Amino acid sequence: MKKCISIILSMAFLFSFTFSVYAMENDDRSHINSDTVTSSGRVMSLSDFNTLYGPPSLSMYANNVMSEQSAQITINNINIQKDILSFTANISVDGVSEKLSASGKLYNSYKKKDGINSIIGDLVDYNKNYEILLFEIYNDNHEEILRIDSPLADTPHLKLYLKDSEGQILLFELPIPTVLLDIEIANQEKSPLDKDAYWFAQVIPPVEEKEIFSEDGFLDDYDTSLNNQTRAVGTATDWFASSYNTITYTYAGSQVYCSSRPYGSWYAANVSGDTTWNIDFRLAEYTTIDGVRNENFPNAFTYREVTLGAGVGAKTTIIRRFLTGAVYGYGEGSNIGAYIGNTAWSALSSVAPTSAQLLSALNSCINSSTYRTVKLGDDVSSRYATGDQSFSSRISSSYEMASRDHSMHIQVVTRKSTSGSSTSNGLLYASWKTYKRDVYNGTQTKPINFSYRVS
């Protein structure tokens, strides 16, 4: 029942993410052949757009507050090579014409998760006359509430929403050109958020945005069960980001709320024989639409360049290293790019490093790391000597973590390296870069210092 309600709300939200704009006087206003498509559209000022679609309530009488300008568009010279699209268009507003020369990459839309055949484009106008806010090939019969051209509501159509150099919004909804009717996108890359689910955020600011500073382990809101007690060496312990982000948007009468909090667990033990230490990075996140969680609508916050590391203290060495996890599009057994680093004991000035010296050594390890292709789940030890003091792995920025299904995990096997016993300092470490709608939003680090016995 909960899943059914979520799907219904998701569909309702998709319906609301269309424009409540009156149709032109002539409903038969679009013309299409194999090479070109011509159609009418509407123009409104940015302030009118925000007045219409920014408040919590949606006006069904758009022409009461919007500009009365109309627009004409003719799309031609459509060319598609695999997932790269280009076309030109002539756009006329009140008799003044401008050229659009669009090109860019196509992606499967997030709407595919709801069973809707939708492809979006991350396109740029090389004439620099327009910013392309949304290009969507909606090749499906799920009904949408279209007020520009209501006959297209339950038929395949193309959405092209633009912003011109004066800040005006141009809205075109038209039949799909014949050459684009049967395209399929093979790549499984995540679509750019600002060109898909959050396209409206390019022109409508958030209602509220927060960075919440807290390291407590209260994650009930995330449906994530964790042991949040502070524990010592020898028992798995949870760690939490010192701050996390939330953001709220209101668009077309619906409220979108996102919350995302990095966390993980770590484990270290006293060293006598071969002893395993590990640390991982995970996400507690959710998105709601009008207060109801929606698993298919993407969170606005994502994470890249996730770095995990370990450093051992006196009388200890690292003999084996493992990297595993899952990022967007790649899971256990997949090959991904990562920057792998190691620091030999010979690089340290002390045989019994302090916590500060351990962190300095690990930072040097991370900064001098080398790009490699690694298989998630593999032992990467064959590339290194057995006498390492530090080990690190930083996932390439090409890979992204965006949901609770994504995680990264390193495991090191430690061993006593010299005779005698000692109380030594140890270090496990995590860092990451946060992105808000694919734009860099800051870096956080989480060093975990502890003491352990070597015997």
Image (cartoon, rainbow, N blue to C red):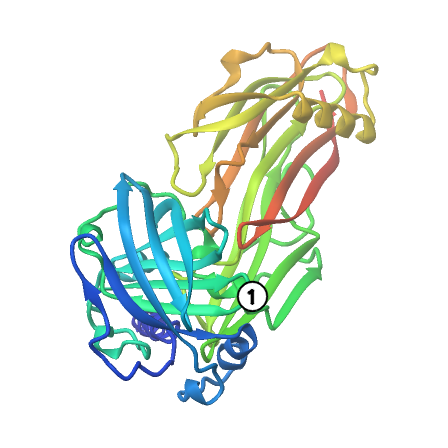
Position of residue 118 relative to residue 358, above or below, is below
Q: Which residue type carries mark 1?
A: Glu
Closer to the camera in the image, 310 or 237: 310
Identity of the residue drawn at 49% across and 56% down: 129
Image point (43%, 68%), residue name: 170
Q: Is residue 358 left or right of residue 412?
A: right
Instruction: Give the percent coordinates (x, y) of residue 163.
Output: 49, 63
Which residue is pictured at 64% across the width and 57% down the height? 244
Quarter of the C terminus within the rendering: top right
Res 238 seen here: yes
Query: Relative to the observer, which residue lies in front, 224 or 383?
Result: 383
Q: Which residue is mark 1?
A: 166
Position of residue 310 measured from the top left corner of the image (x, y, whole percent):
65, 28
Say above or below: 160 vs 385.
below
Quadrant of the snapshot with the N terminus: bottom left
Depth order, front residue of 89/246: 89
Question: Along the horizontal axis of the image, is 417 left or right of 422?
Answer: left
Residue 150 percent across, percent down from the top left: 26, 78
